[in-house]
Image (cartoon, rainbow, N blue to C red):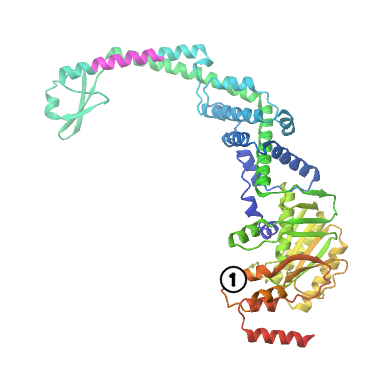
């Protein structure tokens, strides 16, 4: 499947799929490939319903995205809930989930399973603060409020005693401890203090002494009382945390339901956004085996690249009514793009997304395999041909697991044409006999014995139009030559080629600058073979 995804350049699309919640992002990482028509229908239905709700409602869309983005990951473990940070996350989760659910009309909430029953719990947690804060507030326990009031009284008393002591030290000794716990003074100045009982002195270095205020017995007694009150406060806070944790844990089932609903809402909203932004269409899923039909299907990665270069893009329209299909055509004629468009569309459809096409009708597969493009790969000393054979053997064995979409691009091109044609003919015949196989082969080899396979040909290079345009024009650079190939290459898939030989390679070689003498000789050789 990974080679199939890479061939289809699926990640260029998947990078645009950006759910906003931690749960949507976890869903994204799963890279689901649905083989169940019922599951896919549910995914399509939710995305379609969300798209209909949000369509044209910028304000609601922005609010929904805001609350989805602010929704945190919820830890329902006892350790997390028995802490203020854990309860803060629970409150933040509930507050945002409640707003998300309120934004949706009742029928849509029902479809997402968003049944809100936690208003009392949220009110309870809101006693500890709103917004981006949470603490164990006085509202949770009257005894806690009393303890904190007593602590505050101690703090006021301590402040008064300190200020009184510091005032005495300033007036009597000229020492200002404002905003300081100690002072460093010269030894000579310290000697003049005469061992004052309200000061504690100790050596600092060879010529200096550290002095600190001694606040006295009254201060110590109040400070000790404050420590006692603080210990009691912590006991009461722990009791409140335990009570709140129990309240949250008691609604675990409801919270888990909210998690599931939020994930579905997030994923559906993001799928709806992509469908609107990229002009995607809901696929039509038929029971296997069924025809695969594409109408003006766009391979988005290539469409984007061509648009950036100012080049024309031709969508693919094709109908594949047989399980085994062969696409003939010359190099640069669009065979590979046709396969990529098909693979890209199928991956989108079976990943739960809508498809960039006027319409896309298909059936479902248990898996997908790609064979080709192995010239740059090495594995255990195998040549590119060996790798292709290994990949095919694995794909062939996978047919035992259920319907498989098999895409082969220039398969066996690295061996001699005679053996390649024989091997491909045998493979096509074998796949035609196997009900789970739905195969596409793009090749420039002619004369294949395709048996019951459907044959197609890329229309190819429009020589007459090119000659008319190019007549009398001066030579040009590579960019312009590539533009000309794009301009006059007809990327249309025509049925019923019968495996006739592709004849565009020499023309394209000439456009790309191969010497005229070589081109003339190649054309002469071709004439001699007829």
Residue drawn at (85%, 54%), measured in percent from left and top? Answer: 290
Measured along the vertical axis of the image, is residue 301 above or below residue 377? above
Q: Which of the 4 image quarters holds residue 342?
A: bottom right
Dot 1: element: helix
223 inside magenta stretch: no
Residue 33 drawn above or below residue 452: above
Image coordinates of residue 72 in percent, x first then y, are 58, 34
Q: Is residue 353 left or right of residue 424?
A: left
Residue annotated with mark 1: 480
Q: Residues within 10 Å of mark 1 (few under 14, many from 20)?
A: few
Residue under the image location 73 percent in, 62 percent down: 339
Residue 79 in view (yes/no): no
Expressed as whole percent of the image width and height from the top left, the position of residue 516 reads 63, 84
Highlighted range, magenta: 151-165
Rendered image quadrant of residue 25: top right
Quick one: 205 or 314, which is closer to the camera?
Answer: 314
């Amino acid at each position: 499947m990974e080679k199939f995804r890479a061939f289809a350049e699926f990640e260029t699309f998947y990078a645009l799929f950006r759910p906003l919640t931690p749960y949507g992002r976890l869903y994204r990482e799963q890279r689901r490939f649905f083989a169940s028509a019922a599951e896919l229908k549910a995914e399509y239905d939710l995305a379609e319903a969300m798209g209909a709700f949000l369509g044209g409602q910028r304000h609601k869309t922005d609010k929904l995205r805001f609350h989805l983005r602010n929704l945190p990951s919820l830890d329902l473990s006892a350790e997390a809930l028995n802490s203020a940070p854990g309860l803060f996350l629970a409150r933040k989760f509930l507050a945002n989930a409640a707003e998300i659910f309120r934004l949706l009309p009742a029928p849509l909430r029902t479809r997402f399973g968003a049944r809100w029953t936690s208003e009392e719990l949220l009110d309870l947690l809101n006693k500890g603060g709103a917004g981006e804060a949470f603490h164990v507030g006085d509202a949770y326990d009257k005894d806690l409020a009393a303890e904190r009031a007593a602590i505050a009284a101690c703090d006021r008393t301590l402040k008064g005693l300190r200020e009184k002591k510091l005032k005495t030290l300033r007036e009597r000794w000229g020492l200002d401890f404002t905003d300081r716990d100690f002072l460093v003074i010269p030894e000579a100045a310290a000697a003049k203090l005469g061992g004052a009982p309200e000061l504690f002195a100790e050596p600092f270095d060879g010529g200096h002494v550290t002095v600190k205020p001694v606040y006295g017995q009254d201060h110590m007694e109040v400070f000790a009382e404050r420590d006692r009150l603080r210990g009691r406060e912590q006991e009461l806070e722990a009791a409140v945390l335990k009570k709140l944790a129990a309240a949250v844990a008691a609604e675990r089932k409801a919270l888990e339901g909210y998690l599931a609903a939020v994930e579905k809402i997030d994923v559906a909203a993001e799928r709806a956004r992509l469908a609107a932004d990229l002009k995607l269409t809901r696929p039509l899923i038929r029971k296997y085996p069924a025809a695969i039909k594409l109408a003006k299907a766009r391979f988005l990665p290539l469409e984007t690249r061509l648009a950036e270069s100012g080049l024309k893009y031709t969508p693919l329209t094709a109908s594949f009514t047989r399980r085994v299909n062969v696409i003939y055509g010359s190099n640069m004629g669009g065979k590979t793009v046709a396969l990529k468009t098909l693979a890209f569309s199928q991956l989108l459809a079976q990943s739960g997304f809508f498809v960039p096409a006027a319409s896309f009708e298909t059936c479902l597969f248990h898996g997908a395999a790609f064979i080709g493009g192995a010239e740059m790969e090495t594995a255990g000393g195998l040549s590119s041909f060996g790798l292709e054979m290994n990949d095919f053997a694995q794909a062939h064995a996978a047919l035992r697991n259920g319907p498989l979409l098999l895409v082969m691009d220039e398969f066996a091109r690295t061996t001699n044409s005679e053996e390649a044609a024989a091997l491909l003919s045998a493979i096509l015949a074998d796949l035609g006999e196997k009900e789970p196989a739905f195969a596409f082969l793009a090749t420039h080899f002619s004369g294949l014995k395709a048996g019951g396979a459907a044959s197609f040909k890329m229309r190819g290079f429009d020589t007459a139009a090119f000659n008319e345009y190019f007549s009398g024009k001066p030579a040009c650079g590579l960019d312009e030559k590539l533009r000309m190939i794009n301009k006059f290459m007809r990327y249309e898939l025509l049925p019923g080629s019968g495996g006739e030989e592709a004849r565009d390679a020499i023309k394209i070689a000439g456009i790309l600058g191969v010497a005229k003498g070589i081109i003339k000789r190649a054309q002469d050789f071709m004439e001699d073979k007829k």
